[in-house]
Amino acid sequence: MKTIAVLTDQSSGAHTAARYALHLAKKMKANVLLFNLAPVPATVLQLQTAGAEQEMEETEVNSLTAYTLQLEQELAASSFTGSWLPQISFDVENTELVDIMTAIDAHKDIAMVVCGVPDEEELADYVLGDTCSRVIDWARIPVMVVPRGAARMNPEKIAYAATLKEEDLQSIGELGELMEAFAAELMVAHLYRSIPDKAVKAKERALQTALYRNLNCGAVYFRSVDDSRPLGDWKWLKANKPTDIMALMLRPKEEMKQFFKRGKNDQATYHITVPVIIMPKRP
């Protein structure tokens, strides 16, 4: 059975992500494993300094136990009686991010990592920030970032931003397999900054042909989107009908910054209000 790993600090943004992950897990028939990324309170640090390690561990276990119970109660209250519910468990052995990501890598049943956006940040800024970048760089599996206010619903449309590189097809295939339980339509879009020449058009046709011939992703279709306007935005996600989840393959840092910092200058960030899945780039 698949498992979804959720990184939490029990803030409102992280709680939104945990609830969203549980909603996905119900449909995917997956379990949920919580990892605690909460900052260590001063009282706990004092305990650690005093050498009371056992008491410190008990404090963290009690906190995660209470939070797990809260999630279980919320899940049960929003589900039909007798319906299948994900099992929620937590990990208290790993507290540093590098240790958490190493533990996730060792769990071969974990199919995706889910994290929320801190209360004072926008999704685009968080994706480009240090913590999320480290999670994405270390993960060998997809990472989903859930914005505050994300609606818990079965996705009907997923949009994938293509690069026209060879790795696109494998990445799209993995995305389709991950989300197959939802039978959502998949829009594969190539966002171009300048008018496509013959070589680019040939790559677009090759990808479009490969999508239909080589993948079994249900309702998949391709769009070539003009993204040359100085003032970038996310309107392309609404083509045909609104997007519920956006996905893209991990790109070099400058390309990720260019993609997410859509505006007149490097400091302008436009709100993105749907969850984003960053697919790992395979060797």
Image (tube, helix red, strand yellow):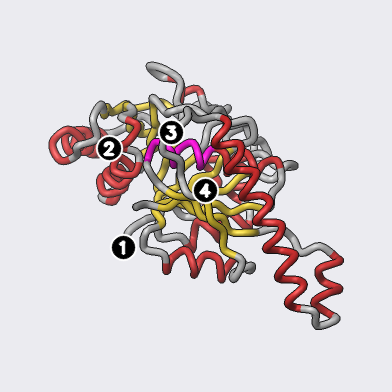
Could you say whether the residue bearing mark 2 is in a helix, strand or loop? helix
Mark 3 or 2, closer to the camera: 3
Q: Which residue is drawn at 47% across and 63% down?
A: 104
- Whether label 3 touches label 1, CB < 8 Å: no
**Toward the viewer: 70 or 145?**
70
Mark 1 or 2, closer to the camera: 1
Q: What residue type is labelled 2?
A: Val
> Which residue is the site of mark 2?
200
- Mark toward the start of the polypeptide (1 vs 2): 2
Q: What residue type is labelled 4?
A: Val
Q: Which amino acid does label 1 sit on?
A: Pro
**Toward the viewer: 173 or 258?**
173
Answer with the quarter of the image where residue 40 lies.
bottom right
CA separation in Å, label 3 and label 2: 53 Å
CA separation in Å, label 1 and label 2: 23 Å
> Which residue is the site of mark 3?
82
CA separation in Å, label 1 and label 4: 23 Å
Could you say whether the residue bearing mark 1 is in a helix, strand or loop? loop
> Which residue is the site of mark 1?
283
Could you say whether the residue bearing mark 3 is in a helix, strand or loop? loop
CA separation in Å, label 4 and label 2: 34 Å
- Mark toward the start of the polypeptide (4 vs 2): 4
Task: From the top left corner, tell me how far across and down residue 154 is, in percent.
Answer: 43, 28
- Whether label 1 touches label 4, CB < 8 Å: no
> Which residue is the site of mark 4?
114
- 27 in magenta: yes
- Mark toward the start of the polypeptide (3 vs 4): 3
